[in-house]
Image (cartoon, rainbow, N blue to C red):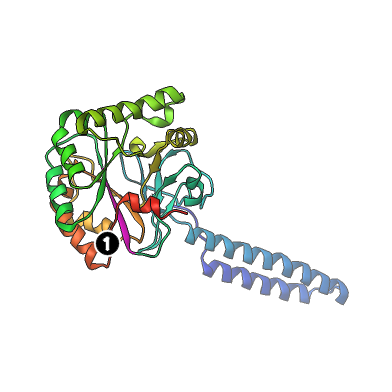
Amino acid sequence: MRHVPSFRRLFLHNRLFYRLKTQIVSLPFPKTLLRKSLATAGLFLFAFFMGNLAAYGVTYFSGPRDHIPAGSSQTISPQPPLLSASNEGNWGLSFQQEGKPPVANASMDYLKQFNAYYAQDTDEKILYLTFDAGYENGNTEAILDALKKHGAPATFFLVGNYLETSPELVKRMVAEGHNVGNHTFHHPDMSKIATKESFEKELTDLENLFQQTTGQQMKKYYRPPQGKYSEANLQMAKDMGYKTFFWSLAYVDWYEDKQPTKEEAFGKLLTRVHPGAIILLHSTSKTNGQILDELLTKWEEMGYCFASLDDLVSRQP
């Protein structure tokens, strides 16, 4: 635990100044020297007092925030700085105010140069639903049913395994008006792929499989696996005509053997929702399959509506 100076201690420093002043006055110094001594001592103690007060404020207001990194676990991490540039590596968020967008480790303005997004800068109560799907375990049908009931469009970011093993579900996604985005063929750490050829192959192999499966061209929407990225990756995706989508709202829903309860899910997803949010949920989550209908209803009761990532892109200047 960090040491925080108390106001009581600061008060004692003031009393120390008073005692010092009394002692100096009682000494047989010339008046001029006395005044100079008092002035010097006063300035020193005033600076010391203000320094401690500032330290108290910094310590109090920069405590840890609830922080969700983009990898495979949830941790508590210090609040990241507001950045106009990027912290390459893992996508991460710091939630600081209910109903407001979180602070991310790359700003919206920084991401724009790469045709990349993590939320929409708006006061309109619009939500953009996205699902990451690495494999199928029986929950996607319930998710699609809930989306259809609410007329809510979504984007499913798929990998090669999903297309190979669940082609009928992919066809249903397309038939019901949802976008299918590129989550790479093998789901590697793309930030470690340095060559343009290797990067392109991960995306084009999935594009080809999607076309073989559905007879349609894949939407040029890309999500880095686990949110791991580099500036070079973002530029490569842009050069291929892709738009990259991170997210501004997610929760730990991907452990099959450690699924959150409904109350835990609502505790995160209802309090952290905000206008213009790009929401990331995993279709492998049993909890998501069970609660999505009720969750969408609760968001609607809060005044939110749902839109496609196509709408977000078209709104950009």
Residue closest to the far front: 215
At which x and y percent is residue 232? 49, 33
Q: Position of residue 263 (x, y in %)?
A: 19, 57
Residue plotted at (45% across, 37% down) = 238
Question: What residue range appears in magenta?
Answer: 125-131
**Residue 185, visible in the rendered structure:** no
Query: Is 43 rendered above or below residue 90?
Result: below
Label 1: state its secondary structure.
strand
Residue 255, position in %: x, y? 21, 40
Give the answer, above or below, for where 53 lies relative to 192.
below
In the image, 79: left or right of 142? right
Res. 315 image quadrant: bottom left
Camera-side residue of 276 and 56: 276
Circle 1 residue: 305
* 129 within the magenta span: yes
Quadrant of the image occupied by residue 150: bottom left
Residue 87 in view (yes/no) = yes
**As shown in the figure, which amino acid type bears the numbered disc 1?**
Cys
Asked whether residue 247 is drawn in magenta, I would say no
The residue at 40%/41% (across/down) is: 243
